[in-house]
Amino acid sequence: MPPNNLRKILLEAVEEGLSSLGDSPKQAIFFHLETHFEISKESISTNLADFSEALEKILGPGAFYLEKLIAKRLYEKLGLEFEEVEHWDFSEYVSNVKKGLLLKMRRR
């Protein structure tokens, strides 16, 4: 899978995860990411650690659950099985997606 496709799918998963909060909260979070943390929607996939840290500053402990929801959506979109791993953060789930995609491609 080309990296641009993965970035697009990751952004879709982020959008869907944030949409679970409602449209206004989703827009407010994107606004804060852009204005207070200098993270645009398009740059989330290349700034996963910063995105995760910003969500935690915006949402507090609730960010963990939102990140897990986003990770689940990402796995679903890519046809991978989501398995919760204790002590993994958001970027580790995304890194695992990349490994899973490589394995799928090698099996073909």
Image (cartoon, rainbow, N blue to C red):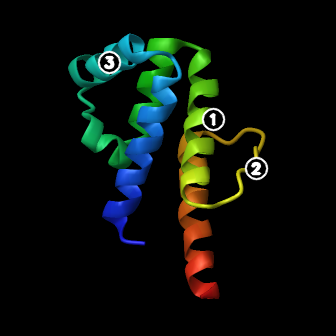
> Residue 28: horizontal and vertical position, in percent?
33, 13
Q: CA distance from mark 3 to mark 1?
A: 19 Å
| Circle 2 SS class | loop
User: Disc 3 or 1, which lies upstream in sequence?
Assistant: 3
Going by the numbered disc 1, the residue's amino acid type is Lys
Residue 71 placement: quadrant: top right
Horizontal side, residue 37 vs residue 45: left or right: left
Horizontal side, residue 83 vs residue 71: left or right: right
Going by the numbered disc 2, the residue's amino acid type is Glu
Graded by Cα atoms within 10 Å as few (under 14), some (14 to 19) or many (20 or more), the crowding at tag 1 reads: some
> Residue 6: horizontal and vertical position, in percent?
41, 59
Q: CA distance from mark 3 to mark 2?
A: 29 Å
Front-lying residue, 92 or 71: 71
Front-lying residue, 15 or 61: 15
Going by the numbered disc 3, the residue's amino acid type is Gln
User: Disc 3 or 2, which lies upstream in sequence?
Assistant: 3
> Residue 7: horizontal and vertical position, in percent?
36, 54
Image mark for residue 45: none
For discs 3 and 1, the disc positioned in front in the rendered view: 3
Horizontal side, residue 84 vs residue 41: left or right: right
Q: Are marks 2 and 1 in contact (CB under 8 Å)?
A: no
| Circle 3 SS class | helix
Residue 48 placement: quadrant: top left
> Residue 58: horizontal and vertical position, in percent?
44, 13
| Pointer 1 residue | 68
| Pointer 3 residue | 27
Q: CA distance from mark 2 to mark 1?
A: 10 Å
Q: Are marks 3 and 1 in contact (CB under 8 Å)?
A: no
Q: Quadrant of the image for the C terminus?
A: bottom right
Front-lying residue, 80 or 45: 80
| Circle 1 SS class | helix
| Pointer 2 residue | 83
